[in-house]
């Protein structure tokens, strides 16, 4: 599994939710600890579990920065279409990363205060490192107050703290060491 592609896909899935929250009249998330479990065929049966500690400011910062992608302040992402449905929201987004256009279709459902679900189909044109499409599911739930060792903006992936103090919900800024730790944690979870 390619680490760069995995990081990109996790980040894009989180970004889709952030773009949706920014551009639609969705309820704000409660301050505290949120758990995000992500599954996709690309992750070969592994489930990535992220936890984020947020407050109103870190969540607002995430929404403000969500459209910036990796462009160092340039707007790389946009919401193409969105609509409220009986059970939540449906949207289409497009991001540019280097020479690849990343298009996403996301369906969100749930109460958005204690739990919600995001089902996404992401396409890459041209294919990114051989991948043309990825389907993923994210189950998000509120856990309560932030853990004692986490402050607003902190994120963990499979129990490994990464991207400290970053914007909640945004793809965490990960050092090579963070990526190595995350991949080791994921390998331990891989079904035999």
Image (cartoon, rainbow, N blue to C red):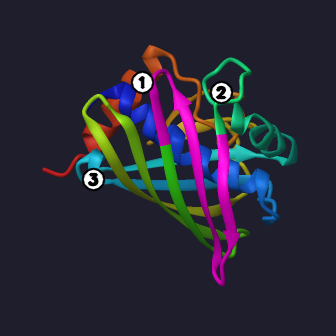
Determine the secondary structure under disc 1: helix
In the rendered structure, find residue 164 and report the number of the disc placed on it: 2
Task: Name which residue lies at 51% across and 27% down.
Answer: 97
Q: Is residue 82 above or below residue 9?
A: below
Mark nearer the N terminus (1 vs 2):
2
Task: Name which residue lies at 79% across and 60% down.
Answer: 30
Residue 106 picture location, percent across and down: 54, 60
Instruction: Tell me how far mark 3 sits from mark 1, CA to CA.
Output: 20 Å
Provide the residue designation for mark 3.
Answer: 41
Residue numbers of the magenta segment: 78-102
Task: Name which residue lies at 12% across and 50% down.
Answer: 192
Closest to the observer, 115 or 121: 121
Mark nearer the N terminus (3 vs 2):
3
Answer whether labels 1 and 2 touch (C-beta < 8 Å): no
Residue 158 picture location, percent across and down: 44, 42
98 in the magenta segment: yes
In the rendered structure, find residue 179 and report the number of the disc placed on it: 1
Q: Is residue 6 above or below residue 145?
A: above
Mark 1 surroundings: few (<14), some (14-19) or many (≥20) residues within 10 A: some
């Amino acid at each position: 599994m390619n680490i760069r592609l995995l990081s990109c896909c996790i980040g894009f899935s989180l970004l889709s939710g952030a773009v949706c929250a920014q551009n639609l009249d969705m309820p704000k998330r409660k301050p505290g600890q949120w758990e995000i479990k992500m599954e996709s065929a690309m992750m070969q049966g592994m489930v990535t579990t992220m936890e984020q500690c947020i407050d109103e400011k870190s969540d607002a910062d995430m929404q403000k920065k969500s459209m910036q992608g990796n462009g160092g302040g340039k707007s790389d992402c946009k919401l193409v279409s969105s609509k409220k449905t009986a059970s939540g929201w449906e949207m289409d987004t497009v991001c540019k990363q280097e020479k690849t256009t990343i298009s996403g279709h996301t369906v969100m459902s749930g109460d958005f205060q204690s739990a919600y679900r995001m089902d996404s189909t992401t396409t890459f044109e041209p294919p990114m490192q051989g991948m043309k499409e990825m389907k993923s599911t994210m189950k998000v739930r509120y856990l309560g107050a932030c853990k004692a060792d986490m402050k607003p903006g902190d994120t963990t992936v499979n129990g490994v703290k990464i991207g400290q103090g970053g914007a909640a919900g945004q793809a965490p800024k990960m050092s090579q060491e963070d990526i190595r730790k995350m991949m080791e944690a994921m390998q331990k979870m891989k079904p035999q």
